[in-house]
Image: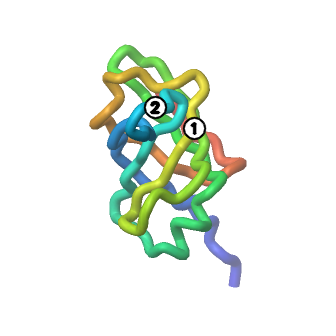
Amino acid sequence: MASASTEPKVYTGLVIGYRRGSNTQYETQVLLRIDPSPSLKKLDELIGWRVLYKDSHGNIYRGKIIGVHGRKGVVRARFKPPLPGQAVGGNVYIYPRGVELVTS
């Protein structure tokens, strides 16, 4: 039997806000909540996956997941250039390395 071509898994997420401490805000790092929330083991496997954010003007921001934040389905992602403040509350796409999303 020939195996069907498998589509890569693409997650959606929500930008919660910038990573921050009591005195410092890291504008290049944002916190993302992944929907639906995968297990903790699956979250560890997402480290290194790519993140794509597209704003209302058509600008595309690309980032990478760099770590897990807590135990409730939140990850840290680094963007270069940093996401604008208007991105908080916006949706992102999370996809594996080596896969290019069609952005039209």
State the image coordinates of residue 11 (x, y, percent, origin top left): 45, 55
The numbered mark, 2 or 1, whose residue comes first in the sequence reads 2
Residue identified by numbered label 1: 78
State the image coordinates of residue 87 (x, y, percent, origin top left): 35, 28
User: Does residue 48 appear to the left or right of 33 in the view shown?
Assistant: right
Q: Amino acid at mark 1?
A: Arg
From the viewer's side, name the closer residue of 66 and 14.
Answer: 66
CA distance for labels 2 and 1: 16 Å
Q: Residue at x 47, y 57 (%)?
A: 69
The label number, if any, that marks residue 17 in the structure image: none
State the image coordinates of residue 67 (x, y, percent, origin top left): 57, 55
Circle 2 — which element? loop
- The colour scheme used here is rainbow
- Quarter-of-image position of residue 46: bottom right
Label 2 packing within 10 angstroms: few (<14), some (14-19), many (20+): few
State the image coordinates of residue 71 (x, y, percent, origin top left): 41, 68
Q: Measured along the vertical axis of the image, is residue 25 above or below residue 86?
A: below
User: Does residue 47 appear to the left or right of 34 in the view shown?
Assistant: right
From the viewer's side, name the closer residue of 49 and 2.
Answer: 49
Circle 1 — which element? strand
Residue identified by numbered label 2: 24
Q: Residue furthest top?
A: 57
From the viewer's side, name the closer residue of 94 and 84.
Answer: 84
Q: Measured along the vertical axis of the image, is residue 3 above or below residue 81?
A: below
User: Does residue 62 appear to the left or right of 31 in the view shown?
Assistant: right
- Quarter-of-image position of residue 8: bottom right
Q: Residue at x 69, y 85 (%)?
A: 1
Q: Mark 2 near mark 1, Cβ–Cβ under 8 Å?
A: no
